[in-house]
Amino acid sequence: MGKRKIRVLLAKPGLDGHDRGAKVVAHAMREAGMEVIYTGLHQSVPSIVNQAIQEDADVIGLSIMSGAHIPICRKLMELVEEQNIGDKLIVVGGVIPNKDIPTLKDIGVKGIFPGGVHFDEIVKFIGENATK
């Protein structure tokens, strides 16, 4: 039997109402052989963590266009630690200024993909860094 596909939970936290990019990234991941669970818009951080646990996701991916990426990622990483699911790969994409990347890395986000990053780069990073 072949090895299990990488399972990615892709979420749109907060009040951000733009999800075209997230849907295109989800499509690219599926095309690369990953299993993608897209949660839809307006998800709370606790809900995202709970869904990642329920779905046995290898990766939690956040798509954030609102500019609230630092507080959202801080809260996510606190809950990831509380729930003892630190083995999951955490990635974030969207409108992320370069000056915020070091802060996100310090928080514990492993993959950071500002707007304009090619989908192949995201897929490659997840394929190389997600544990199955």
Image (tube, rainbow, N blue to C red):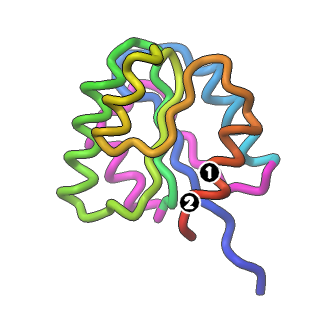
- Asked if residue 35 lies in the magenta stretch, the reply is yes
Label 1: how many residues lie within 10 Å, few (<14), some (14-19) or many (20+)? many
Which quadrant does the N terminus fall into? bottom right
Say which element carries label 1.
helix
Q: In the displayed orientation, state which residue is furthest to the right.
A: 31
Q: Which mark is residue 48?
A: none
Label 2: how many residues lie within 10 Å, few (<14), some (14-19) or many (20+)? some
The residue pinned by badge 2 equals 130
Which quadrant does the C terminus fall into? bottom right
Q: Magenta region: which residues?
A: 32-56
21 up-or-down from 9: above or below = above
For the point 28% across and 53% down, the residue is 80
Kind of residue sitting beneath label 2: Ala
105 up-or-down from 55: above or below = above
Kind of residue sitting beneath label 1: Ile
Residue 12 pos. (x, y %): 46, 29
For the point 50% across and 33% down, the residue is 112
Choose between 15 and 121: the one closer to the eye: 121
Residue 49 pos. (x, y %): 33, 49
Identify the image quadrant of residue 123: top right
As drawn, is 104 to the left or to the right of 59?
Answer: left
How far apart are the alpha carbons under marks 1 and 2? 5 Å
Say which element carries label 2.
loop
- Number of numbered discs: 2
The residue pinned by badge 1 equals 126
For the point 45% across and 14% down, the residue is 97
- Asked if residue 26 lies in the magenta stretch, the reply is no
